[in-house]
Amino acid sequence: MKKRVVAYRRLPAAAVELLEARCDLRIADADSERAAFLDALANAHGMIGNKLRITPALLDAAPLLETAATISAGYDDFDVPELTRRGVVLTNTPAEVTETTADLVFGLMLATARRLAELDAWTRRGQWRASSGPAQFGVDVHHKTLGIVGLGRIGAAVARRAALGFGMKVLYTNRTRNAEAESAYGAQARALPDLLAEADFVCVLTPLSDATHKLIGAAELRRMKRTAILINCGRGPVVDEAALIEALHERRILGAGLDVYESEPLGASPLFTLPNVVLAPHIGTATQETREAMAVRAAQNVLDALDGQRTSNCVNPEALEHRASFPKRHAAPAKSNA
């Protein structure tokens, strides 16, 4: 009998085809088709999607669940220890997001340094009546110093663009040394205070954890140069948003380019009134090619996990050890409060 999988977000055709070839697939959006989603979840061995908080109550409604695949690199929405305790394997899609997110980092760096959003609005208002002058000048990106906070996959891709494409000096801070980036791109490890004081661009790419929550606060922003620009494409709460707004308002740093925020979607915010910030709506992976590749990878992750394979995309491989000890109940009607 085919294993049953529920997709709680719409999937591209390639991912649907991959799953339907080997599974009994049901697609029901967890928000707009909640009842159908819970009904499918009650008998599902696998689930795939993104942007849904996976709570213990929701897991209680999925007594047969063996694997959950998130179509994202991050897995903030999942209680990993709880999934592990229940023997549910969690997988993600880190490799597929790397290059596209690195592109956006550089897009925000260039847009902020050259004031593209501000000058676009200025041009549209009909204020371009003569050659641009000092009032419209930005700053160069090439041959400047870039400080990367969190030199993982995406950070390394940013370092490659910076060193080989823009002739930049690359500094980084990370939990562990990155010998490959040091050799290939001349990246130099720094303690965070030293990186902040030296860098012309500070790019935040570290994951969110207890250790990184508000890692960049008022004190850290004060260490940055007045001519420096902050880019955040990691997680919003890694930067103290109120402190950043104050620093931008007082021009204690030159500008910021943001794709992530403390609360998303971003509601009414003082950021909207600041000319020296470029705002993007969390679009790090938002290209047609990348989103399809992520969905296909997540679908393959489901199939691999249901086959009992351990892959590099598995977040909690130890879940397999807990599966035998966690009692699997017969499928039951979904709980209304899940």
Image (cartoon, rainbow, N blue to C red):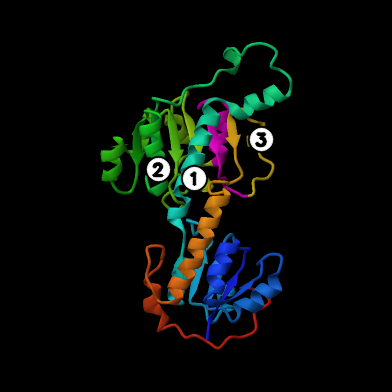
Q: Is residue 123 left or right of residue 186?
A: right
Position of the C terminus by quadrant: bottom right
**Residue 177 seen in this snapshot:** yes
The type of residue carrying mark 2 is Ala
Magenta span of residues: 241-264
First in sequence: mark 3 vs mark 1: 1
Residue 309: image quadrant is bottom left
Residue designated by label 1: 101
Q: Secondary structure at mark 1?
A: helix
- Residue 318 screen position, x and y as percent: 37, 72
- Residue 37 screen position, x and y as percent: 65, 73
Real-space CA distance between mark 3 and mark 1, rounded to the nearest whole angstrom: 23 Å
Name the disc covering residue 166, or none: none
- How packed is label 1: few (under 14 Cα within 10 Å), some, or many (20 or more)? many
Q: Please tell me which residue is depicted at 62% across the width and 50% down the height of the picture.
A: 264
Name the disc covering residue 272, or none: 3
- How packed is label 2: few (under 14 Cα within 10 Å), some, or many (20 or more)? some
Q: Is residue 261 left or right of residue 195?
A: right
Residue designated by label 2: 157
- How packed is label 3: few (under 14 Cα within 10 Å), some, or many (20 or more)? few
**Callout 1 touching callout 2 (CB < 8 Å):** yes
The type of residue carrying mark 1 is Thr
The type of residue carrying mark 3 is Phe
- Residue nearest the viewer, comparing 270 with 152: 152
